[in-house]
Image (tube, coloured by chain):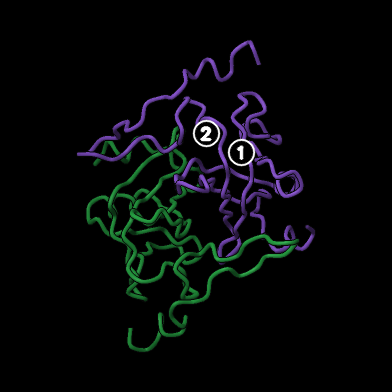
Chain colours: A green, B purple
Amino acid sequence: MQALLDAVPFDANGLVAAIAQQHDTGEVLMLAWMNRESLAETLATGQVCYYSRSRRRLWRKGESSGQTQRLIEMRLDCDGDALLLLVDQTGVACHTGRRSCFFRAAQEGAWVEIAAPLVPAETLYGETR
Amino acid sequence: MQALLDAVPFDANGLVAAIAQQHDTGEVLMLAWMNRESLAETLATGQVCYYSRSRRRLWRKGESSGQTQRLIEMRLDCDGDALLLLVDQTGVACHTGRRSCFFRAAQEGAWVEIAAPLVPAETLYGETR
């Protein structure tokens, strides 16, 4: 574990970019960030844990919404500043209720929504959780 | 074009993360960065242009190596801090000569190479170019 962590040159903020990709379909779900602690937890538990830059704390994906990501394989890029997480996404990755965060496409000079929410966003973070 | 650019909240360094994915196979090729100028050029030309943080200048992918990326579709994520580029990659994306930059996988506590170079790295940046 230590060797895995030591090989990642975290940036000036102590972070590394992490791309989550659904392991079997190849769909790119989201881009988020990890610090050393969240990377260690992800490797130890097999459940993806990011670092939330806005909330400045560990972000156990799905902790509020139940939309967890199980790690299937983790890859590191050539210069070590990005991780690719092959995951099995429960439900939806995006806080808007869409499967992927990349739901807008450039079409004729505008960003056009190409995917609708699969679940209402408000139910993801509702009172029942 | 202006509307597309204005919708991207570039970070404090004027950059946005860009993931390149081979459009037909789903393979994630690399993660790099774009500034407003490189994003505009990419949209205008259909050839992917990044911003090199180390060289501090536009990085027209393939300008030295010939390994260009043709843009098929561009997507923006929910909070606008990441782009997904669906591309058609000529040859290899990685400067090491591998198809993808993500050629190391975490296995039993170590990063293990899971892909070999398809072309020798030295030929990518040789005297003939």
Q: Amino acid at mark 2?
A: Ala
Q: Residues within 10 Å of mark 2 (few under 14, many from 20)?
A: many
Residue B73, image x, y percentages: 62, 53
Q: Secondary structure at mark 2?
A: loop
Q: Answer with the quarter of the image where residue B56 lies.
A: top right
Residue B55, image x, y percentages: 65, 30
In the rendered view, does A4 fall on the left or right side of A109? left
Residue A113, image x, y percentages: 61, 70
Q: Residues within 10 Å of mark 1 (few under 14, many from 20)?
A: many
N-terminal of the pair, mark 2 or mark 1, is 1
* Chain letter for the residue marked with disc 2 in the picture: B
Foreground: B41 or A36? Answer: B41
Q: Which residue is mark 2?
A: B93
Q: Is residue B49 above or below residue A24?
A: above
Q: Amino acid at mark 1?
A: Gln
Q: Answer with the quarter of the image where residue A47 lies.
A: bottom left
Q: Secondary structure at mark 1?
A: strand
Foreground: A62 or A101? Answer: A101
Q: Which residue is mark 1?
A: B69
* Chain letter for the residue marked with disc 1 in the picture: B
